[in-house]
Every structure is written in structure tokens, then in C-alpha cells.
Image: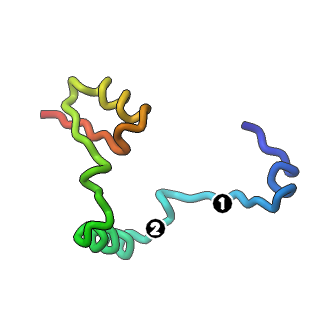
Amino acid sequence: MNLTGMDIMGESKQIIGLIEGDAIPQLFIPKLIKYFKKGKFPVDKLMKFYSFDQVNQAFDDFTSGKVIKPVITFK
């Protein structure tokens, strides 16, 4: 995708760069844990574990949106 100045300025848009969500881990992680304990952040439902021999299934599930964070285990 090639953006021109008019693509951005025409509708008063902004481009902002982020690195890893631009969060402060010492503040952000305790908040996530608090939300998880209250049932407001279902991190366990965002991840699914796959054995290494299921790597193709993990990739397919991720690209289809079935799972947000596939985790490959090497047992």
C-alpha cells in the first residue's frame, strides 16, 4: 500500500507507530491479571496449545480466526 499526503491530510488522519502496544509492563500486566481474576479477560480462551506435529493445523486455525494465539509445544 502506498499512501500519499492527501490520503492522510484529506481526512485529518494520523499515523502513529507503536512498539509492542506501547505499554508499561509493570503497570499493564497487573491490570491484566486483575481483569482475568474478575472474569473480564479470558486469556485462557484466546490461546490454544498444539503439539509440534499439529503446526499446520495451528496455522490454519490462526489464519481462519478460530484461535487468536496458537502456542506450539515441543514435548
Q: Find residue 2 and name its label.
A: none
What is the C-alpha distance between the residues marked 1 and 2? 14 Å
**How would you rate the neighbour count of disc 1 (Cα within 10 Å): few for under 14, some for 14-19, many for 20 or more?**
few
View extreme (left): residue:
75
Q: Nearer the viewer, residue 59 or 73?
A: 59
Who's the residue at 25% across and 72% down the image? 38
First of labels 1, 2 by sequence position: 1
Number of marks present in the image shown? 2
Q: Find residue 16 and name its label.
A: 1
**How would you rate the neighbour count of disc 2 (Cα within 10 Å): few for under 14, some for 14-19, many for 20 or more?**
few
Q: Nearer the viewer, residue 11 or 6?
A: 11
Who's the residue at 32% across and 67% down the image? 40
Who's the residue at 22% across and 34% down the image? 50
Who's the residue at 28% across and 27% down the image? 55
In the displayed structure, does residue 20 sit left or right of residue 49? right
Question: What's the residue type where badge 2 is placed?
Answer: Ala
> Which quadrant of the figure has residue 60?
top left
> Which quadrant of the figure has residue 71?
top left
Does 16 sit above or below residue 35?
Answer: above
Does 23 sit above or below residue 11?
Answer: below
**Image quadrant in which the N terminus is located:** top right
Q: Are marks 1 and 2 in contact (CB under 8 Å)?
A: no
Q: Find residue 23 and name its label.
A: 2
Percent x, y of residue 6: 87, 50
Does 60 sit above or below residue 35?
Answer: above
Question: What's the residue type where badge 1 is placed?
Answer: Ile
